[in-house]
Image: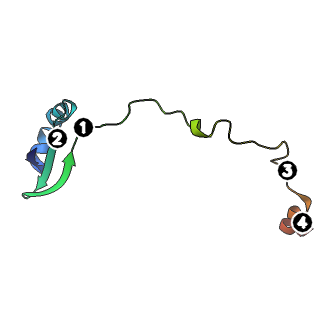
Amino acid sequence: MKTVNMHEAKTRFSQLIQEVGKGRSFVIAKAGKPVGLLIPFTGSGEARTPGRSWMGNIEMSDDFDSLPQDLEDEFYGG
């Protein structure tokens, strides 16, 4: 893994990203001390469907948006 100083990384950022896209990794250093790591993204690449894991597991009652009278009395002083 090649170490690249901060100034060089800023100057050659686009080139470094192209190399990372090919699978290479880089250590980013400041004053010779490693401070970061530039690595390839290894995500699934699949589009996420929000709520997919909960589908069919949640039921909502017909009166979910009505406030029970005793609770209304507590809030508004009955």
Q: How many other residues sit within 10 Å of disc 3, few (<14), some (14-19) or many (≥20)? A: few
Q: Answer yes or no: do the residues labelled 3 and 1 have beta carbons within 8 Å?
A: no
Q: Compare marks 3 and 4 and give the one earlier in the sequence.
A: 3
Alpha carbons under labels 1 and 2: distance apart: 7 Å
Q: Compare marks 3 and 1 and give the one earlier in the sequence.
A: 1
| Residue at horizontal 89 percent and vertical 70 percent from the top | 77
Residue 66 horizontal/vertical position (percent): 85, 50
In screen coordinates, is 64 left or right of 15?
Answer: right
Q: How many other residues sit within 10 Å of disc 2, few (<14), some (14-19) or many (≥20)? A: some
Q: For the residue marked with disc 2, what is the amino acid?
A: Ser
| Residue at horizontal 14 percent and vertical 48 percent from the top | 27
Residue 73 tag number: 4
Q: Which residue is mark 1?
A: 40
| Residue at horizontal 12 percent and vertical 40 percent from the top | 11
Frontmost of labels 4 and 2 is 2
Q: Compare marks 4 and 1 and give the one earlier in the sequence.
A: 1
Q: Compare marks 4 and 2 and give the one earlier in the sequence.
A: 2
| Residue at horizontal 35 percent and vertical 36 percent from the top | 43
Q: Answer yes or no: do the residues labelled 1 and 2 have beta carbons within 8 Å?
A: yes
Q: Which residue is mark 3?
A: 66
Q: For the residue marked with disc 3, what is the amino acid?
A: Ser
Location of residue 32 by image quarter: bottom left
Q: For the residue marked with disc 4, what is the amino acid?
A: Asp
Decide which of 23, 71 is in the foreground and name it. 23
Alpha carbons under labels 3 and 4: distance apart: 13 Å
Give the quadrant of the C terminus.
bottom right
Q: Answer yes or no: do the residues labelled 4 and 2 have beta carbons within 8 Å?
A: no
Frontmost of labels 3 and 1 is 1
